[in-house]
Amino acid sequence: MDTSPHRSDILEVNGIHLHYLDWGGRGPVLLFLAGMGCNAHIFDHFATRFTDNFHVLALTRRGHGESDHPETGYDIDTLTQDLYLFLDKMKIERAFIAGHSLAGIEMSHFAALHPERLLGLVYLDAAFYRTLPEFKTMQATNPLPALQNPGQNVDHYSAQDYFTYINRTFPSLAAIWGSVMEQQSLHEITVQPDGKVVDRMSSAIESGLNATLSSYEPEDARIQAPTLSFFVNQDGTGFISRETMTEAQQAQVLDYFQTARLAWFQRCLELFRLNVQHAKIVEIPHGNHYCFIKHEELVFDEMNKFLRA
């Protein structure tokens, strides 16, 4: 049950309908953007902590949640235009934007094109460089796709059965699963005529987003706005499943995180420091990608100091 004290609405933007949540509050606008496969409801709890000093909203991008799911428009220019036109429709001249994961490319491109519309940027483990050689090595050596598949060919006929499967398959999600994650996930599934529960996002949309992620060349050097960036160093322990992985497979996962993934993480951190020299960077060791949930107090304290500076 959705108990977050927000207003939920739909706005026609760029020829489609986009869903957003508005928690109210007084002060400058703070707009949250979710990561891939998530929607505005992922911030149902976290967003409420900022309403004393900010007008807090969250936008659900196309292809997610209650927003329209057109088969096209997942290139970086269209995604960023959606954001720009949303702010226009809402009559928001300038805003702080805080984005998780996938949202990092939208924030960086928006900052390059429309610096005058920004009060500041907060990257919630979102400052990634996916065109690096280290990323390609990481993808090529990642053992998880072959291991995270127990029950993948089993159909599910209730949301709870589906979520149980997700939690068993992805321990890193199980670690942050709760009422907020469950509520947002209810908006990312649909029930087919035969009663089967499936992801609402089509494979075409997922492919379009992944193509954009893998091809986007970060424009971080053009960021002028005040910037706070959280970098989560995941050590692999959160991806271990003692239920479905052998000891050898567990060791393989840990080795991957401590070698290939660590090399990419360190390179991303190095490049962001170089490209955005005015940024405040907060490293979270042994962390979870959903840092605003798993490490809520740390992220809130750092964001609160940054936003009110």
Image: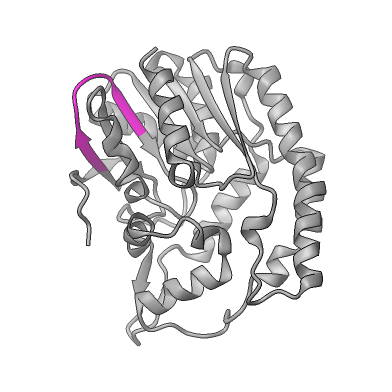
In this picture, which residue range is highlighted in magenta? 21-31
- Residue 141 percent across, percent down from the top left: 81, 57
In this orientation, which residue lies closer to the viewer: 169 or 31? 169
Residue 275 lies within the magenta run? no
Q: Give the side of residue 141 with respect to residue 34, left or right.
A: right
The quadrant in which residue 212 appears is: top right
With respect to residue 206, does 23 lie above or below? above
Determine the residue positioned at 35% across, 87% down.
194
> Main SS of the magenta segment?
strand
Q: Which residue is at the front of the view, 6 or 153?
A: 6
Residue at 39%, 54% in the rendered image:
64
The quadrant holding residue 118 is top left
In this view of the protein, can residue 170 be seen by the observer?
yes
Which image quadrant is residue 187 in? Answer: bottom left
Q: How many labels sit on residues?
A: 0
On whether residue 28 falls in the magenta region, the answer is: yes
Residue at 53% in and 28% down: 109
Quarter occupied by the N terminus: bottom left
Image location of residue 224, percent across then percent down: 52, 13
**Does residue 2 appear to the left or right of 47 in the view shown?**
left
| Image quadrant occupied by the C terminus | top left
Q: In this orientation, which residue lies closer to the viewer: 58 or 210?
A: 58
Regarding residue 14, the answer to whether it shows in the image is no
Q: Is residue 210 above or below residue 125?
A: below
Taking the image as shown, residue 255 lies to the left or right of residue 166, namely right
Vertical relation: 227 (above or below) 292: above
Could you tell me residue 146's position as x and y percent? 72, 71
Percent position (x, y) of residue 7? 17, 44
